[in-house]
Image (cartoon, grey):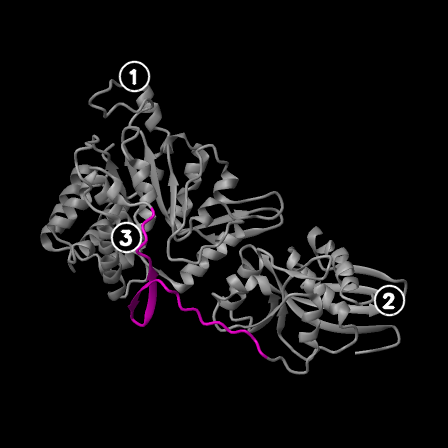
Amino acid sequence: MEDKNSIIVNHLMCATLDGVDAKIVDVEGSLTKGLPTFNIVGLVSSDIQEARERAKNALLAQGYELPPLKITINLSPSDIKKSGTHFDLVVALLIALGDRLIEHKGIFVFGELGLDGKVKSSSLIFPLILSLKEQGLIKKAIVPRESIDSLKYIDDLELYPVDTLKEATEVLSLSELIDPVIFSTNYSYEKLTIDNREYYYTKEYTEDFASVKGQELAIRAALISAAGMHNLLLNGNPGSGKSMIAKRIRYIMPPLSKEEILSIARHQFLGGLSPSFNPIRPFRSPHHTATSAAIFGGGSHTAKIGEVALANKGVLFFDELPHFNSKVLEALREPLQDREVNIARVNSKISYSANFLFIGAMNPCPCGNLLNKHKECRCTTHEIKRYKNRLSDPFLDRVELYAVMQEIDFNKKATYSSKELHSMVIKAFSSQKKRKQISFNGDLSEIEIDRFCILDDISKDILQKATERFSLSYRSISNIKKIARTIADINESDIIGKREILEALSYRRRE
C-alpha cells in the first residue's frame, strides 16, 4: 500500500512469552519520508530496543544499505510486553526487503542476529514454537539452522533453517516457498503402546537401587511412591540412605509420552538448562537456604519459573526438610494439592503446571540419633518437639507415604535392583492406563477414587475401624485408598483387598 507520505512495507509474524505460553506478535514495518531514524515501538523490552544496533550492523555486513527514510517497526498487540533477542531477524528482514511485497502469509520468523549477519539461536525459540504448535497457531517458520537440533522433536512443522540474514531474505523473496524441513520424531527408546498411544522409557539406571543395602521398608515405599506418584517422607538417622533412595526414584518412574518429554524440555529451556529430550524424569534438589522466589519463581518485573516448574513431571526433593523456611513449606501446599503454581506481579500474572513427585527427608531429631541403637540422643524433649513442629499438620497431610529408615546392616544384600523395581512400576502404569485412568493414582479426584478404588467388604471394614480408632481426616482416608489402589496395581489385583489396605495403613504418619 502506498501514498504520498508513507509506504507500509510488510507484515511478518513472531511471538513472545506471556507467562509460559506464547502469544502471536504481528511485526509490521513502515518506511516514511522524513529525517532518517530507526524506532521500534509496541511495549518492547530493552533487548528488543538493542535489536536496532544489531540489525543495522547485520544489514551492512550482508551488503544491504539502510534506506534514507524514517524506519518504524511496530510490534502488536501493544498491550503485551515483548521481550527476547529472537526478534532481531524479523526486524532486519522488514528493512532488507524494502518495498518488496511478501506473498507468504502466516510465516513466522525467529532468530538472533550477530553483527556479521549470522543468524543465531535463542533459548526462547523452542518453548515459543512448541507453545504455538500446541495451540494450533503455527504451520511454517524461518528459524536459525543451529536451533534444528531441538526443533526436530516438534512434528509436522514446515521449517526453513537459515544461517545468515541474506539467506533468510532469499527465502522470503521466492514467489513460492520450497524444500521445507519437516520432522516426524521416532524416539529410539523402549516403548509401551496402550490404546494407540505411545509411552517411552529407558533401561539405563545411572544410580541403581542395587547399591542400597537393606532398607526393605523404605524401598517398598519408594516403589509405591513411583508407581502412583504419591508424595513420600523418609525419616531416619544421618547416613541411613534417605538421599540415596530419593536420587534413585527418578529412574524407576513411569514412562513418558512424547508430549510430556517436550513439556519437560520446554521448562528446561525456560529455566536456562540444557534440554534432555529423553524419558528420564527431572530431579531437582534445592538447598534448604533457597528463597521462595528460587523455589516457586518470581522476579521484580517479569515472573520467571522456579524449582517447582523445573521439577514438573519429575521429582522435587527437599533434604533436611525441617530446615526449609516455614513460608516456603506452607506455600508448597498449593502445588502439592492443585498441581500448579500461580505467581502475581504488578506487570505479570502467570500460572504454570507443577505436577511433580515430592520427596522429603528428615532426621528424627536435631542431633539425628533418636532412632540410633548405638549412639545416644543429645536432644531434650523440648528440642525434639520444636524440631518436629517446624512441619505443620496441613503440610504433612499432603504427604501420603511416611517411611522410617531401618538400622544399616551391611551384611544384607540389596532387596531389589532398579531394573526389577522399574518393571513393577511399568506393570502398575499399564494397569492404570488400561482402566482408562488419565491421572496417576496419587492425583485421583474424589469422583475418580469412587470409580477406581474399589474395596472388598473386608477392606472396607478395616478402613472403617481405622477411621474410628485414629480419627482419620477425609483427606487421610482418600490418601489411604489411593495408596491401596497403587499397591493393588503392583500386586496385579483389580480389587483392593485386606492385604492392600493394611499395607496402605502402615505408611500412615503416626505422630
The numbered disc on residue 228 is 3
| Residue 167, picture quadrant | bottom right
**Residue 150 visible in image:** yes
Q: CA distance from mark 1 to mark 3?
A: 38 Å
Residue 448 placement (x, y as % from top left) = 28, 59
Residue 220 placement (x, y as % from top left) = 21, 44
Helix, strand or loop at mark 3: helix
Q: In the image, is residue 98 part of the stretch drawn in magenta?
A: no
Q: Earlier in the sequence, mark 2 or mark 3?
A: 2
Residue at the image position 30 percent from the left and 42 percent from the top: 232
Count of numbered tags: 3
Between disc 2 and disc 3, the foreground one is 2
Going by the numbered disc 1, the residue's amino acid type is: Arg
Residue 442 placement (x, y as % from top left) = 30, 52
Judge whether 319 appears above or below 105 on screen.
Answer: above
**Residue 45 visible in image:** no
By secondary structure, the bulk of the magenta-drawn segment is best described as loop
Q: CA distance from mark 2 to mark 3?
A: 64 Å
For the C terminus, give its image quadrant.
Answer: top left
Helix, strand or loop at mark 1: loop
Residue 186 placement (x, y as % from top left) = 40, 68
Q: Is residue 166 left or right of residue 431?
A: right
Residue at the image position 75 percent from the left and 72 percent from the top: 97
Numbered range of the magenta stretch: 179-206
Helix, strand or loop at mark 2: loop
Judge whether 264 appears above or below 136 on screen.
Answer: above
Q: In the image, is residue 187 part of the stretch drawn in magenta?
A: yes
* Residue density around tag 3, few if under 14, some if 14–19, many if 20 or more, within 10 Å: many
Residue that carries the numbered disc 1 in the rendered image: 378
Going by the numbered disc 3, the residue's amino acid type is: Gly
Q: Earlier in the sequence, mark 1 or mark 3?
A: 3
Residue that carries the numbered disc 2 in the rendered image: 69
